[in-house]
Amino acid sequence: MSNSILVIGGGFSGLTAAVEAAEMGYQVYLVEKENYMGGRVAQLNKYFPKLCPPTCGLEINFKRVKTNPNITFYSNATVDAVAGSEGNYDVQITVKPKFTTPQCTAACKGKDVATTEVPNEFNFGLDTRKPVYMPHPMSFPYQCVIDPSVVNTDEGKKIQEALPAGHVDFTQTEEKINLNVGAVIVATGWKPYDATKMDRLQYGKFPNIVTNMMIERMASPSGPSEGKIYRPSDKNPPKTVGFVQCAGSRDKDHLPYCSYICCLATLKQITYLREQSPDTEIVVFYIDIRSPGMKYENFYKKVKADPKVTFIKGKVADVKEGSNGNVVLIAEDTIGGGKVEKEVELAVLATGMQPEGALSPITGIEYDTDGFVVPKAGIIPCGCSKRPVDVVSSAQSSTAAALKAAQVINRRAN
């Protein structure tokens, strides 16, 4: 039987579970599919409950991972399959090449000679990046990455020549790793629900319809606009903004459950807008505002008291193009009565939270119909792989998962 623990996912939940288990003395393997740790939290401008930037919590966990000899971590890696039983799981992992070496921490000279640009996935396509890049300013591990598309091309050779000797290695290939572990913690997190699937909301058809995660990247000082929220069509700050709640959530045709964080995300983003402009007018179309707990409820009351913010209880049923690139949101006001049409300069879809299991299931892990992990002896989900939760609840869930994994190992050992 193995005394080690596998943690799948290096977001806030996975990092928390890994350091908690490692600091109890267990050998931990941490696997993250992206080139960096931190998950969705790394993309936020601020997160609840303190409304602090992601550096607040992530830097501490990064240091704990880096300095703990009990943790072995892999980035740009995927878990292909998990097989076995409680106390004795065989795990297959694929580690993809970054085509750089750990000392490659500056991509500037490589960017200068690169000619191609692709949409920046970290910023949800709001800007572009070169094929040699640092994933984001606080990346961990702090190592540049080169796209496979330029390997052994003329552009790739120019990048290699521009960077210091030994920083680029185009001979790297995929590495297959087999592990034996006693317990598996699944912290694979979530993705924003694909807004293009909701035809009535017209995302992708009108430029000034964005998602809530795009607003987070705009508002971030490290984002595409250095913290300024703008209309994509003309890069101007919006004077009127409409939020569309439950965009994909609580909908039998999309995500049937409440995604928990969307209401709070909207309330938070309203504060971003109001801080940037005292004249910005905001309208929120909602089914119910869900702000669980006294602290969140008080935050909601504070936002609601703002005379520039209007809440309309009604689900947006249709979206039309307005004048000068504006967007017209159409809903039925269930309290005031009658059809409501609001023309806004920027519309924000509060897209739901879809677990990674619905999109990229791992062989050997059981999922429910929505893609959340089904717990069983030795396989323990936490954070948003278990259910929709906020960052605080993710940390609590992850600590509990680390304790459960320790119990599995100790029970089998005895």
Image (cartoon, rainbow, N blue to C red):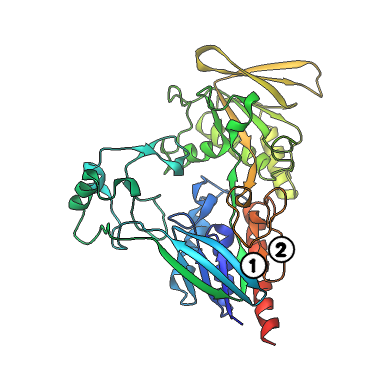
Residue nearer the viewer, 203 or 289: 203
> Where residue 138 appears, x then y in whole percent?
41, 54
For label 1, the SS is helix
Residue nearer the viewer, 149 or 395: 149
Q: Who's the residue at 49% across and 51% down the image? A: 42
Q: In this view, does 385 lie to the left or right of 103?
A: right
Q: Residue 362: name its quadrant.
A: bottom right
- Mark 1, Cα crowd under 10 Å, few <14 / some 14-19 / many 20+, is many
Q: Residue 126: name its quadrant.
A: top left
For label 2, the SS is loop
Q: Is residue 70 left or right of residue 312?
A: left
Residue 366 image label: none
Residue 399 image label: 1
For the N terminus, the quadrant is bottom right
Q: Return the residue found at the far bottom.
A: 414
Q: Which of marks 2 and 1 is in front?
A: 2
Judging by the rendered image, the residue that carries numbered circle 2 is 375
Is residue 283 among what the camera can see?
yes
